Image (spheres, helix red, strand yellow):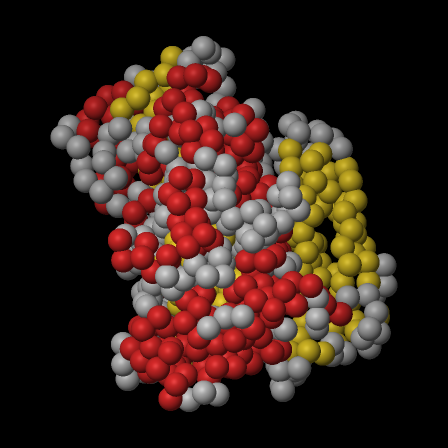
């Protein structure tokens, strides 16, 4: 038993039943009633309470007014930044920059902790392949390998040690499990999947987050294969706590224990509390059913006390690990400094770097980008998102402040205006036309050398319960671009700001360049101007496939073959291929892959092989390439995807420069779950590719014997 466990056990031994139950209760608001409950020791955690003064006042009640003085755990949704807003997770994933993700999480944690928040409900590690779902913006995309590494990087960042050596905030990998698999892209809906899909695709990012030390897990709203996740013993006790040995705490999603009633899984509130506790949910977020019913349930059935003790022990351990007993309070100076001062320069610099690395150049047919201010002396900036502070931050940016955001128009004026004339005209609203907006935009574009048109989604079109049936641009914005194209000869650079892949084939055929910018956060304009002018050579790669049409969903690169892969088309009314494949992204330079080498072409089941490839920057600018390694297990005891990402390396190369990148293929990469879902490496042939994205690469063959 380690010291933390011993200390938690000693404390537990002193607790009354009511005190124990109190630790399992969390509320998402703090009004008179909750204040009173805190002072009575009947609340163990709060979320949505802000400001060091308020938080200290509540901590004082918990620490000084209650018999045992157990501090509160204050949580919040610190998803992609706190005061400094970084790109939405889907955008950040496009950077494929794990170190950057870790840094962003660390900064977010530091800013949150300075206000007294010691627990974030992040990272969301739900893999999803349905862009209709608004929460795709919070995900790291479709791929299990990339999402697993991202999960671990973010956990490390959030939990990096503070100056006293404690985790800055506790991370919470969510939503366990299967939430990204909801039917029809409808939030909270049913999920139903095979055990194989669960184990191969959905669970690994959670496991990676937990192996990286995540102190908590959130149970999902959705049901999985007939059992709501927040009532699932199989998920929470059998897999998470027993199989993986997770010793942190599980919190329910918002009222998801009480919602067991609506799922038809619990009879009433009391029954829902019983089912939640039995399943292994340690803390009840917001529904109050543990507070109201655990005492009676335990009186009816004293055996439940063991389960409650286990839940409380886990919660106490998290509080001890965070050093909350040593230091429950936060400096109140932080409130003033955060309010009065600008974002620290180092945080802003990281936000800018992260944002520009997240931008994906999708199309640049005529080489219009980077903008050449020597040639393009008059630049028109058009579009509803070009000067929109709030929406540039994306969903879940509650603590971000509009006034901190540098919009594209701000950055045009500060960075480009010294070299060229810049003009701005929104041309359209996000969802509605503006009176004469299109006419004004057409007139302006007609007088300029290039038009940069910033279109896309508002933050409120993405995130929780903002789902759509059509993943396209709103019609008024599509019309704006169509009219600019129809009525002027001015080259058009389209910048997309969005929280989900948008299926807009027309746009890609007609725009001179297309830049995928997601919602980039505080440094939006600076990052975009860096990319548009070539001060930064774009390096982002898609973490998700962009379909041509909503009807192609689900569309992802690592599908399985059918029995008739070459005989029929998928659809009679739409091409089979995506608009842009997973892993895709252009640069202002070009890269050539040569000399794919396998150190050995045949290996034993426990051995590994080195893979190397040479990459040359064949263009005229310094740039970064993300070399991606994919495999295919050709014949196996369960059918395998046509491609699986198993590694990537990022390299910066000067014009003309070459380098060799190395990968290792071993058990972990080559293994699969066999018929009984046991991990094994089977003998057989593998195709191995290294290339710039999931549809292109040099190919070699490896045999496992
Ligand atoms: C969301 C969670 C979030 C929680 C607390 C829920 O609605 O699903 O992701 O952490 O609210 O705000």
Please determine whether, in this image, residue 32 is positioned above or below residue 293: above
Judged from this view, the residue extending furthest toward the top is: 418
Question: In the visual, does 354 lie left or right of 578?
Answer: right
Q: Nearer the viewer, residue 357 or 207?
A: 207
Q: Nearer the viewer, residue 190 or 307?
A: 307
Q: Nearer the viewer, residue 650 or 404?
A: 404
* Residue 553 at x, y percent in the picture: 39, 63
* Residue 172 at x, y percent in the picture: 51, 59
Quadrant in which the N terminus appears: bottom right
Q: At x 38% / y 12%, what residue is drawn? A: 421
Question: In the visual, does 386 lie left or right of 168?
Answer: left
Question: Is residue 657 among the parts visible in the rendering?
Answer: yes
Q: Give the image quarter of residue 617.
A: top right
Quadrant in which the C terminus appears: bottom right
Question: In the visual, does 352 lie left or right of 414?
Answer: right
Please determine whether, in this image, residue 276 is positioned above or below residue 545: below
Q: How many marks?
A: 0
Judged from this view, the residue extending furthest toward the left is: 435
Question: Is residue 153 among the parts visible in the rendering?
Answer: no
* Residue 273 at x, y percent in the picture: 36, 77
* Residue 449 at x, y percent in the picture: 38, 19
Q: At x 45% / y 28%, what residue is drawn? A: 337
Q: At x 47% / y 31%, what residue is drawn? A: 333
Q: Give the image quarter of residue 226.
A: bottom left
Question: In the visual, does 272 lie left or right of 217?
Answer: left
Please determine whether, in this image, residue 694 is positioned above or below residue 270: above
Q: Nearer the viewer, residue 231 or 411?
A: 231
Q: At x 42% / y 89%, what residue is drawn? A: 301
Please determine whether, in this image, residue 8 is positioned above or below residue 524: below
């Amino acid at each position: 038993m380690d010291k933390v466990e011993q200390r938690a056990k000693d404390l537990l031994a002193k607790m009354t039943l009511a005190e124990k139950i109190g630790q399992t209760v969390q509320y998402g608001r703090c009004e008179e009633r909750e204040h009173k409950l805190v002072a009575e020791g009947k609340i163990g955690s709060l979320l949505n309470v802000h400001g060091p003064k308020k938080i200290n006042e509540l901590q004082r009640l918990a620490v000084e007014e209650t018999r045992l003085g157990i501090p509160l755990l204050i949580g919040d949704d610190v998803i992609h930044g706190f005061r400094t807003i970084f790109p939405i997770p889907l955008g950040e994933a496009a950077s494929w920059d794990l170190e950057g993700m870790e840094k962003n999480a660390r900064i977010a944690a530091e800013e949150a902790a300075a206000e007294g928040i010691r627990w974030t409900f992040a990272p969301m590690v739900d893999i999803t392949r349905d862009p209709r779902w608004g929460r795709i913006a919070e995900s790291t995309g479709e791929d299990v390998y990339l999402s697993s590494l991202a999960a671990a990087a973010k956990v490390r960042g959030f939990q990096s040690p503070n100056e006293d050596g404690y985790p800055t905030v506790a991370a919470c990998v969510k939503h366990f499990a299967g939430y990204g698999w909801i039917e029809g892209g409808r939030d909270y809906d049913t999920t139903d999947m095979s055990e194989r899909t669960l184990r191969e695709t959905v669970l690994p990012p959670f496991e990676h987050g937990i192996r990286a030390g995540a102190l908590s897990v959130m149970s999902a709203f959705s049901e999985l294969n007939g059992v709501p996740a927040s009532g699932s013993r199989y998920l929470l006790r059998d897999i998470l706590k027993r199989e993986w040995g997770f010793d942190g705490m599980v919190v329910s999603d918002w009222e998801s224990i009480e919602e067991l009633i609506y799922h038809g899984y619990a009879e009433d509130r009391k029954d829902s509390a019983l089912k939640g506790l039995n399943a292994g949910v340690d803390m009840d977020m917001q529904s109050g059913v543990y507070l109201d019913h655990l005492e009676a349930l335990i009186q009816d059935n004293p055996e439940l006390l063991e389960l409650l003790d286990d839940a409380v022990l886990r919660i106490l351990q998290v509080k001890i690990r965070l050093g909350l007993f040593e230091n429950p309070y936060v400096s109140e100076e932080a409130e003033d400094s955060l309010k009065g001062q600008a974002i620290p320069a180092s945080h802003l610099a990281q936000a800018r770097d992260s944002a520009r690395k997240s931008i994906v150049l999708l199309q640049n047919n005529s080489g219009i980008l980077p903008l050449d201010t020597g040639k393009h002396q008059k630049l028109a900036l058009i579009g509803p998102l070009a000067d929109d502070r709030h929406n540039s931050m994306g969903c879940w940016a509650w603590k971000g402040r509009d006034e901190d955001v540098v919009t594209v128009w701000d950055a045009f004026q500060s960075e480009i205006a010294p070299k060229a004339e810049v003009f701005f005209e929104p041309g359209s609203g996000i969802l509605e036309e503006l009176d004469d907006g299109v006419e004004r935009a057409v007139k302006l574009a007609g007088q300029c050398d290039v038009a940069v048109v910033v279109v896309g989604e508002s933050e409120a079109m993405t995130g929780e319960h903002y789902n759509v049936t059509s993943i396209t641009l709103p019609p008024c914005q599509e019309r704006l671009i169509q009219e600019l194209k129809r009525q002027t000869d001015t080259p058009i650079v389209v910048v997309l700001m969005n929280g989900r892949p948008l299926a807009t084939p027309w746009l890609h055929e007609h725009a001179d360049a297309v830049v995928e910018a997601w919602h980039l956060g505080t440094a939006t304009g600076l990052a975009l101007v860096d990319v548009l002018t070539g001060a930064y050579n774009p390096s982002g790669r898609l973490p998700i496939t962009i379909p041509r049409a909503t009807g192609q969903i689900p569309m992802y690169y690592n599908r399985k073959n059918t029995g008739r892969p070459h005989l029929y088309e998928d659809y009679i009314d739409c091409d089979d291929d995506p608009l842009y494949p997973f892993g895709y992204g252009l640069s202002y330079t070009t890269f050539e892959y040569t000399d794919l080498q396998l150190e050995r072409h045949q290996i034993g089941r426990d051995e590994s092989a080195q893979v190397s490839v040479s990459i040359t920057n064949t263009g005229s600018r310094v740039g970064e390439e993300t070399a991606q390694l994919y495999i295919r297990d050709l014949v196996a005891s369960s059918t395998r995807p046509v491609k699986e990402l198993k590694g990537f390396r990022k390299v910066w190369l000067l014009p003309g420069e070459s380098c060799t990148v190395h990968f290792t293929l071993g058990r972990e990469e080559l293994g699969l779950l066999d018929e009984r879902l046991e991990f094994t490496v089977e003998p057989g042939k593998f195709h191995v590719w290294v290339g710039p994205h999931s549809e292109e690469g040099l190919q070699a063959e490896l045999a496992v014997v």
